[in-house]
Image: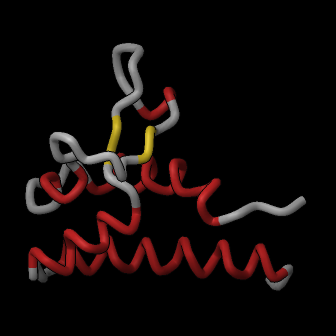
Amino acid sequence: MSLSAASLEPDLMAWLSARFESRSTLRSLFALAAGDRSGVPLPASAGTQGAPPVTCGLAELLTRVARSRRSGDDIGALLARIDASLESFERAHAGTP
């Protein structure tokens, strides 16, 4: 079985959003801007009240982090989780532990 990073992006974004969006310093980074078409629909399980929420995609999130020039523990934790997730995907895809 072969998975692409793009096929895992909605799950990764749902997980990141659930874990970090509640932090007031990061909330605006996850919001889908009006008219933004780069958003990734989240799985219905990530939403509340039936309709799944929509968040920006990973590339947009990273762009927003860079443009915001924010720093601190919350940004550090977010970037560390993204890095760990991508490394895990890379190891799984390469078949290494």
| Whether residue 47 is situated above or below residue 51 in the rendered picture | below
Residue 50 at what x, y percent from top left?
A: 41, 14
Residue 23 at what x, y percent from top left?
A: 16, 55
| Whether residue 93 is situated above or below residue 26 in the rendered picture | below
Q: What is the quadrant of the N terminus in the image?
A: bottom right
Residue placed furthest toward the top: 50
Quadrant position of residue 4: bottom right
Residue sitting nearer the eye, 61 or 87: 61
Residue placed furthest toward the right: 1
The structure residue drawn at horizontal position 13% and vertical position 54%, both measured from the top left corner, is: 28
The structure residue drawn at horizontal position 62% and vertical position 65%, both measured from the top left corner, is: 5
Q: What is the quadrant of the C terminus in the image?
A: bottom right
Residue 80 at what x, y percent from top left?
A: 39, 79
Tell whether 92 sits left or right of 85: right
Residue sitting nearer the eye, 19 or 69: 69
The structure residue drawn at horizontal position 51% and vertical position 49%, both measured from the top left corner, is: 10
